[in-house]
Amino acid sequence: MYINNMVKIIKYALLIYFFTFSQAQADRLVPLKDWIFKNENYLKDKVTQSYLINRCSAAYLLVAGLTQTNSDGILSKQFADISQDLMIVNANILMSLKGWGQKDALQNIQDNVKRMGDAYYADAKDNYAKTGEYTSVGYIRDDLILCKKTTEIFLKQYK
């Protein structure tokens, strides 16, 4: 119960952060397809799973924030909920892998998702300035497609 409540708090805090205080100069991310090519064992290795889950959590929170004002907010909530589910999975992976308690695992996830979210947000703003689209062009679109596939695998494996 504690972990679910803490992840909800982190999810909403990160959403607010991304769309109000995000850094202008965020570190840029390597496209996930390139990262996967270099980390072929990503579905079996818990360290690379954790990284990928953080990336997908950040990508889903980006979409949740971008769709927040659309219609009744259902799409935004769906993406935020998927991100939350991934954070819970990742907290369990980190607690098992590193022997951390919930607090340390959640702090690590929050820090990583925030950093990755900053990069996604900066790139999404650049995409919008160039094309009028935030996520339907470039590596962010490709990352979201890969995240959809891997999220299904991770949620089946760990839920």
Image (cartoon, helix red, strand yellow):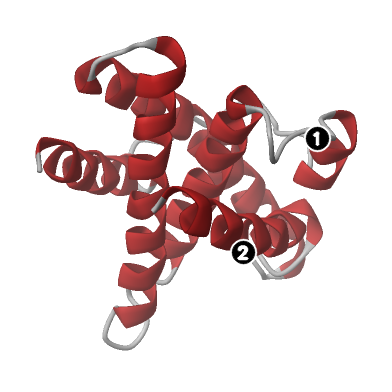
* Residue position for label 2: 148
Q: Which of 10 and 16 lies nearest the eye of the viewer?
A: 10
Say the numbered circle drawn on residue 85: none
Specify the farthest residue to the top: 99
Identify the residue shown where x is 81% and y is 39%: 36
Q: Which of 62 and 92 lies nearest the eye of the viewer?
A: 92
Q: What's the residue type where badge 2 is placed?
A: Lys
Image quadrant in which the N terminus is located: top left
Q: Secondary structure at mark 2?
A: helix
Q: Tell me: residue 17, above or below residue 111.
A: below
Local crowd size for mark 1, using a 10 Å CA cut-off: few (<14), some (14–19), many (≥20): some
Identify the residue shown where x is 33% and y is 75%: 69
- Residue 32 position within the rendered picture, expressed as x and y whole percent measured from the top left: 76, 43
Identify the residue shown where x is 23% and y is 48%: 12
- Residue 145 position within the rendered picture, expressed as x and y whole percent measured from the top left: 70, 64
- Residue 30 position within the rendered picture, expressed as x and y whole percent measured from the top left: 78, 34
- Residue 130 position within the rendered picture, expressed as x and y whole percent measured from the top left: 76, 60
Residue 159 appears in the rendering: yes
Q: Which of 132 and 91 lies nearest the eye of the viewer?
A: 91
Residue 129 appears in the rendering: no
Q: Secondary structure at mark 1?
A: helix
* Residue position for label 1: 35
Image quadrant in which the C terminus is located: bottom left
Q: Which quadrant would residue 14 be assigned to in this image? A: top left
Q: Specify which label sits upstream in the sequence, 1 or 2.
A: 1
Q: What's the residue type where badge 1 is placed?
A: Trp
Instruction: Report the side of 103 relative to 35 (left or right).
Output: left
Instruction: Report the side of 1 relative to 142 (left or right).
Output: left
